[in-house]
Image (cartoon, helix red, strand yellow):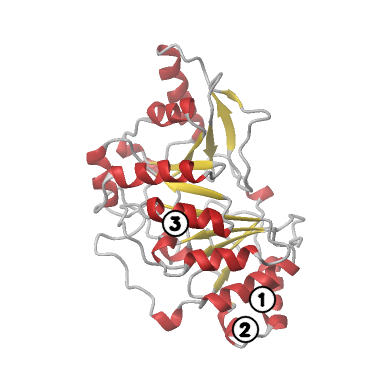
Amino acid sequence: MKDSHGRTIDYLRISLTDRCNFRCIYCMPEEGIESLCHDDILRFDELLAIVRVAATKGIRRVRLTGGEPLVRKGVVDLVRQMNDIPGIDDISLTTNGVLLPRMAADLKAAGLKRVNISLDTLDADQFTYITRVGAIEQTLDGIDAALEAGFNPVKVNAVAVRRLNQDFLGFAKLSLDRPLHVRFIEYMPVGESGGADGTGWGKEDVISAQEIRDIINEGARAEGLGELIPAEGSRPEGGGPAEYYHFEGAQGTVGFISPLSRHFCGSCNRLRLSADGGLMPCLFSDERLDIKTAAEAGDEAAIAAVFDRAIGNKPDEHHDRVGTERGMSQIGG
């Protein structure tokens, strides 16, 4: 599929649920959000119908997100059935890792290829502050389980927020001795805007990818590690926009995703599907095209028509928009 700006669209991010077992401060209020009703969420047979049509339109990569996707019952069987769809070459998952120790092996056997695990701090107390309900050991155990199950690559995603004063060098050093691919993501103005306390996004909290890299390099030089160098030939598999670097001799890489300081809209290759059946051309847009009605009716031609409209409506870039009607947990991270 080509959009009106000549970009090939081959990647679909699917939110399986808006529910989560964490309450991360940059994602949702402490009390959570009003969850979708059971009847409002796409059934798995509807999701599979959408993916089958998407594959005929050129979608090759699918990423399952949430909320926390692993809290939805039946996800292993969904992966297995999705893996059998002709044309789907890569199924991946974004998770907080809590449920991976008991699910990683089954997910790998079902056909899941890759996992991204969200981890925003290496400090135990700060982890509980950020997630409000979690313990860092849960996510660290999830990372161990993903490696033990043989997923490759295993990526660790850290949202960089200035007021959190995160240990960026400590994160980068996770890539030294194990094949972990650490990625820093600039804090994005999705959802409620205008504040640095609680869930509100504030521009003052954004740290650019370049500044993060400079902080890492300064600390690495002081420790005798040398600076990060471009990861030519060792870039991990995936369809995302990260720029990758590595330390000399490291098993993994360090990536930087810069949606604000260095737009990658010109190479955007994705659409997003919300848990309640909204097909979204852009993360930074409130436009949602109803694909649930067509899926409920089993009308493949109508499903295809919604994809065509979404592709046609895909904007050239996000134009530095601040704030969206839905938060990240409702869109699909």
Task: Please tell me in which quadrant of the rendered image residue 280 appears.
Answer: bottom right
Name the amino acid, label 1. Answer: Val
Disc 1 vs disc 2: which is toward the camera?
2
Q: Relative to residue 14, is residue 27 depicted above or below? A: above
Question: Which class describes the residues within 10 Å of circle 2: few (<14), some (14-19), or many (20+)?
Answer: many
Q: Earlier in the sequence, mark 1 or mark 2?
A: 2
Q: Which of the two labelled residues, at mark 1 and mark 3, occupies the earlier sequence position? A: 3
Residue 86 quadrant: bottom right
Q: How many marks?
A: 3
Residue 289 visible in rendering = no
Residue 130 drawn above or below residue 84: above
Q: Which residue is mark 3?
A: 190
Q: Is residue 302 left or right of residue 131?
A: right
In the picture provided, is 193 more to the left or to the right than 109?
Answer: left
Of residues 111 and 47, the one drawn nearer to the viewer in this rendering:
111
Q: Which mark is residue 109?
A: none
Tell me the tag on residue 294.
2
Left or right: 133, with 280 as reference point? left
Q: Contact (CB < 8 A) between labels 1 and 2? A: yes
